[in-house]
Image (cartoon, coloured by chain):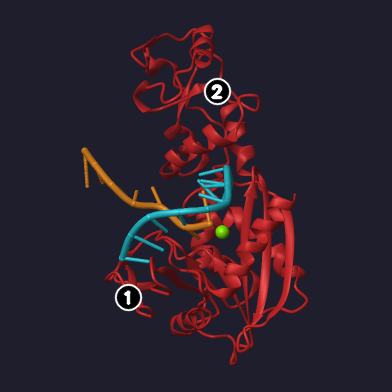
Chain colours: A red, B orange, C cyan
Amino acid sequence: MDLYKAIIDIINQIPRGMLTSYTQLAEALGDQTVARAIRRVIRDEISWGEAPCHRVIEDQGFIGEDESEKRVRLLKNEGLRIDNSRIRDFERVMFREFNSTKPLQRLRAKQKQLAGKAKLVNSFTEVRTVGGVDVAYKNKEGYGAVATFDYKTRELIEVKKAKTQVKFPYLPTYLTFREFPLIKKLVSKLKELPTILLIDGNGILHPYRAGLATHAGVVLNLPTIGVAKSLLCGKIEKIPSWIGEHPAIRMAGNVIGYALKISKGKPVFISPGSNICFDTALNVVKNLAAESRLPLPLMTAHQNAGNFRRQN
DNA sequence: GCGACAG
DNA sequence: ATCTTGTCGC
Ligand SMILES: [Mg+2]
């Protein structure tokens, strides 16, 4: 799914002399809650040559952050008048008749469906190898790396890299649609699949229990663990104080992950993706603790992705 | 009504 | 995620 293209297509539907708000644009995309994230995407990742981004404003007719002469001139040339950072009679020029397939609505439905397929039981008996995957970015290019280690000896077994054009912006709770395509490609390059794959992000620690690690676990039919550096949702029982402590994270009363103090400093948020249980997920990450905050396979994948990005 | 929001 | 080296502090 190319969401950049979908955003550009919708903005291009706004006729000259009319406007739309980030909220309406998000609605047309199929999820009103991402309005602010879409504002960021338009500001940082879409050029005015691709679509008339100057026609997207805040709610209530406010022109928003960008009051540059260039933008004000364009709007005036299109017949609009501005009083105190606001469009005069804005209600009459708001365009609402978008033609859209509401992609985010469809993707959300897919997430809900996928969540039901997650299995929180071990699909393996012995942990022999553990891999880690991560992605680094340069504009809209994603540079990924996967690194596999021997679980017992902590010996590096193999590293694979891959590059791709990214078609989906970062939107909280939709990370999987940005990163999974490259992760899939990376895993397919491995000579041998690891027993478990660690992923930089969440598993069922997600508003719909369908984070990147869960998506990858279900689709690739591989045991996966989500390891996130900040909390997406849920409530932490308590802030862990000693190394190894792992208070539960709950959502609607259910445990969805753990805040593991893996080193001194901030904790890391662990959740099963699929094909693995809570206890094993926690223990595997604990046993792969390294000098840094990230477990060994993820640290190595992270570094390799970053270096790969610099070299290109 | 306000604040939060994986990478 | 990204811009970026050494350096101050727990
Ligand atoms: Mg990452």
Residue A287 at x, y percent in the picture: 51, 83
Q: Position of residue A41 (x, y in %)?
A: 53, 38
Q: Is residue A237 above or below residue A92?
A: below
* Residue A217 seen in the figure: no
Instruction: Locate residue A233, reporting x and y percent.
Output: 37, 60
Q: Amino acid at mark 1?
A: Pro
Image vertical order of residue A34 relative to residue A246, above or below = above
Q: Residue at x 33, y 74 (%)?
A: A248
Which residue appears at 58% of the width and 23% of the height? A52
- The chain holding disc 2 is A
| Residue A14 marker | 2
Q: Nearer the viewer, residue A24 or A49?
A: A49
As helix, strand or loop, the secondary structure at mark 2 comes to: loop
Examine the image and state in which quarter residue A47 appears: top right
Q: Nearer the viewer, residue A97 or C6?
A: C6
Q: Name the residue that disc number 1 marks.
A: A247
Q: Nearer the viewer, residue A37 or A309?
A: A309
| Residue occupying the point 49% across, 37% down | A40
Q: Is residue A194 visible?
A: yes
Query: In the picture provided, is A281 more to the left or to the right than A87?
Result: right
Amino acid type, callout 2: Ile
If you read the primary sequence from the N terminus, does the residue marked by circle 1 or circle 2 appear first?
2
